[in-house]
Image (tube, rainbow, N blue to C red):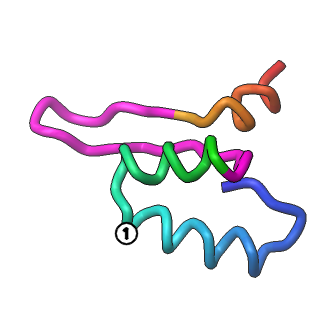
Amino acid sequence: MVSDSAMTADGLSTGLFVLGQTEALRLAEQEKLAVFLIVRDKDGYRTAMSSEFAKLLR
């Protein structure tokens, strides 16, 4: 979670964590949030990011 405010980023990242990957990314896209997720599954770890986060990598 990238935000101009550390408090906002902290609060949103906690909420997004509780939602899980699918809903977190859906909300991130809807609200245009810059989000990068590291998700653990049965095969190890994988990553996912919102389109707003991808823009930061350009």
Residue 4: horizontal and vertical position, in percent? 89, 64
Q: Which of these two is toward me, 31 or 51?
A: 31
In the rendered image, residue 33 lying in the magenta stretch gets the answer yes
In the rendered image, residue 26 lying in the magenta stretch gets the answer no
Vertical placement of 33 versus 16: above or below? above
Q: Is residue 50 left or right of residue 37?
A: right
| Residue furthest left in the image | 42
Residue range in magenta is: 31-48
Q: Which of these two is toward me, 9 or 22?
A: 22
Which residue has dot 1 on it?
Answer: 18
The quadrant in which the C terminus is found is top right
The quadrant in which the N terminus is found is bottom right
Residue 29: horizontal and vertical position, in percent? 62, 41
Residue 31: horizontal and vertical position, in percent? 69, 52
Q: Amino acid at mark 1?
A: Val
Q: Residue at x 81, y 60 (%)?
A: 3
Residue 54 falls in image quadrant: top right
Q: Residue at x 34, y 56 (%)?
A: 20
| Residue furthest top in the image | 58
What kind of element bears circle 1?
A: helix
Residue 25: horizontal and vertical position, in percent? 50, 44
Q: Residue at x 63, y 47 (%)?
A: 30
Q: Is residue 1 left or right of residue 14?
A: right
Residue count near mark 1 (Cα–Cα under 10 Å), binned few <14, some 14–19, many ≥20: few
Q: Residue at x 73, y 46 (%)?
A: 32
